Image (cartoon, rainbow, N blue to C red):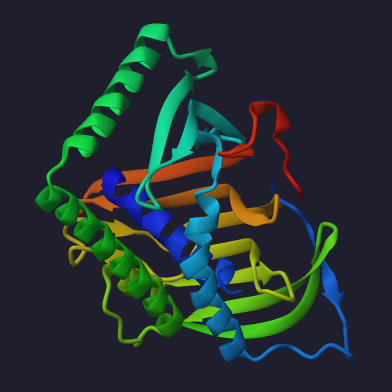
Amino acid sequence: MKRRLRPLARGIACAALALAAAAASNARLGADVRQPSRPLPGVETVKDAIREHFRLDPVRESKFTYLETRRRMKHDGNGRAEVIEEKVYEVYPDQPVGRLYRRLIRRNGVPVPPAELAKQDADRRRDLERRARETPVERARRIRKHAEKLRENQEELEDALRVWHVRLTGYERLGPRTLLAAELTPRPDARVRTRLGKYLRSVKGRAWMTPDDFQLVRAELEVVRPINIGLGLVGRVHKGGRAVLERTLVDGTWMLTLARLEASGRAFLVKPVSIDAVYEYSRFRRVDEPASARRTTR
């Protein structure tokens, strides 16, 4: 069940990112900023921006390397969070656009031994060598599978747009920025085509976007009805699961910097399971930029 909860939680996060980021920690939100001279944009304008960003963002993001820190958490009897596992990866863009290569460099604060690094690098070289030797038929098959994945991602985005009623609520302050806020309310009877779309019918959220080009800065999601996996026989995600996403502007490109996922449920009707994970992204660097020139623009 944990293996199924993780893709679900990440899928919910990605769908919100596709909707709000492509459209549209614990930072405190300020009161509404009233801007009577600045009318709210039309929802269809926001949705059109969603689709355009969704198409272009993977290409923009593929120009960067960065660090990814994954933490598994648990809470003690007083509700305090404790890290029970931490892994740090170097992440490199791969081909075709959208694929990533992750190199584990630190585990629970301890650098990965040189022998293990060497093995990862050797495995990577073999993968590249296999790709260089692939036949035209193998290459066509690989490209076709990637195209199918892109179509699936696009259909998930369209499902998110079908499921969520988007209501623009006004302008609010988040840190130093004045942002466009939106409420995402699920339509339980929305007709969907993907498994993720089915799950999203039980998820509500809020999103905060840049007011001019509708890029996501923060999104908060919550499971408002239990989500059944395999008719509930394989698993069930309980009401109350949450996801938080944050993005920042890096050298002209909006990049994900934080994803926090919390969910609980059960596997095979009886076994209780939970996920509490934090993903942080930092030290962004363009692939054509020297290592000494790293910078992040907030």
Residue drawn at point x = 36 percent, y = 46 percent: 95
- Indicate the quadrant where residue 45 lies: bottom right
Q: Can you say whether 123 is above or below 263 in the image? A: above
- Indicate the quadrant where residue 77 lies: top right
Does residue 68 appear in the picture of this structure?
yes
Q: Report x, y in % for residue 259.
A: 54, 49
Residue drawn at point x = 39 percent, y = 36 percent: 101
Residue drawn at point x = 74 percent, y = 75 percent: 211
Residue drawn at point x = 64 percent, y = 67 percent: 215
Is 59 in front, or is 42?
Answer: 59
Disc tally is 0
Q: Report x, y in % for residue 73.
A: 50, 35
Is 141 in front, or is 24?
Answer: 141
Q: Report x, y in % for residue 169.
A: 71, 83
Is 103 in front, or is 170?
Answer: 103
Q: Report x, y in % for residue 240.
A: 48, 61
Does residue 265 appear in the picture of this structure?
no
Does 290 sit left or right of 89 as displayed? right
Does 218 sit left or right of 128 as displayed? right
Q: Can you say whether 227 is above or below 171 in the image? A: above
